[in-house]
């Protein structure tokens, strides 16, 4: 039962941390720390005392939580990387920059290179 609770907490906290924090490793560290803390707090509230194997449990819970948070972060980082590589879109927020007159994203304010549109050549 405890492993199911740990996995549930790690998944929820991992999703929230990777959604809110754009840096992959920082999101893993924050998600692992918060989910481990929440799990240990719930165990302490449930039992009313710390177990004699507390240090071993801290290591195991940390490793399980780390693995879950790292696995959850992979799709987030792939989507963000794909968004950053698309030309004509802001590298930070993904806003469509086509048709803008200034060299700054109106959504997040990030400086960006001007987009050059090909002119249609007509014979006169």
Image (tube, helix red, strand yellow):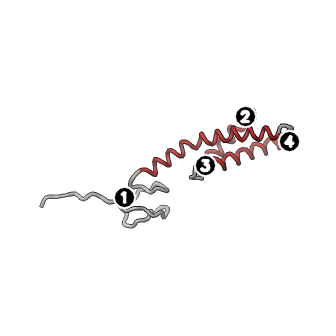
Please, is residue 110 above or below residue 20 in the view? below
- Residue closest to the eye, 65 or 99: 65
Please, is residue 116 above or below residue 76 in the view? below
Give the residue pinned by disc 4: 50
Within 10 Å of disc 1 (Cα), the crowding (few <14, some 14-19, many 20+) is few
Q: Mark 1 vs mark 3: which is more N-terminal?
A: 3
Q: Mark 2 vs mark 4: which is more N-terminal?
A: 2
Q: Mark 1 vs mark 4: which is more N-terminal?
A: 4
- Asked if the residue at tag 4 contacts the one at tag 1, i.e. Cβ–Cβ closer than 8 Å, the answer is no
* Residue shown at 68% from the left, 45% from the top: 32
Q: CA distance from mark 2 to mark 3?
A: 24 Å
Estimate the x, y position of residue 89 in percent, counting from the top left. 42, 55
Give the residue pinned by disc 2: 3
Within 10 Å of disc 3 (Cα), the crowding (few <14, some 14-19, many 20+) is some
* Residue shown at 58% from the left, 44% from the top: 73
Within 10 Å of disc 4 (Cα), the crowding (few <14, some 14-19, many 20+) is few
* Residue shown at 59% from the left, 53% from the top: 21
- Asked if the residue at tag 4 contacts the one at tag 2, i.e. Cβ–Cβ closer than 8 Å, the answer is no
Give the residue pinned by disc 1: 98
Give the residue pinned by disc 3: 25
């Amino acid at each position: 039962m405890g492993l199911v609770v740990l996995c549930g907490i790690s998944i929820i906290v991992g999703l929230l941390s990777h959604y809110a924090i754009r840096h992959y490793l920082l999101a893993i560290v924050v998600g692992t720390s918060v989910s481990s803390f929440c799990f240990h707090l719930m165990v302490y509230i449930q039992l009313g005392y710390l177990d004699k194997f507390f240090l071993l449990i801290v290591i195991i819970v940390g490793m399980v939580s780390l693995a879950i948070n790292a696995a959850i972060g992979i799709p987030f980082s792939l989507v963000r990387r794909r968004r950053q590589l698309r030309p004509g879109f802001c590298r930070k927020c993904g806003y469509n920059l086509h048709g803008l007159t200034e060299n700054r994203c109106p959504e997040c304010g990030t400086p960006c290179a001007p987009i050059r549109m090909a002119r249609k050549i007509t014979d006169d």
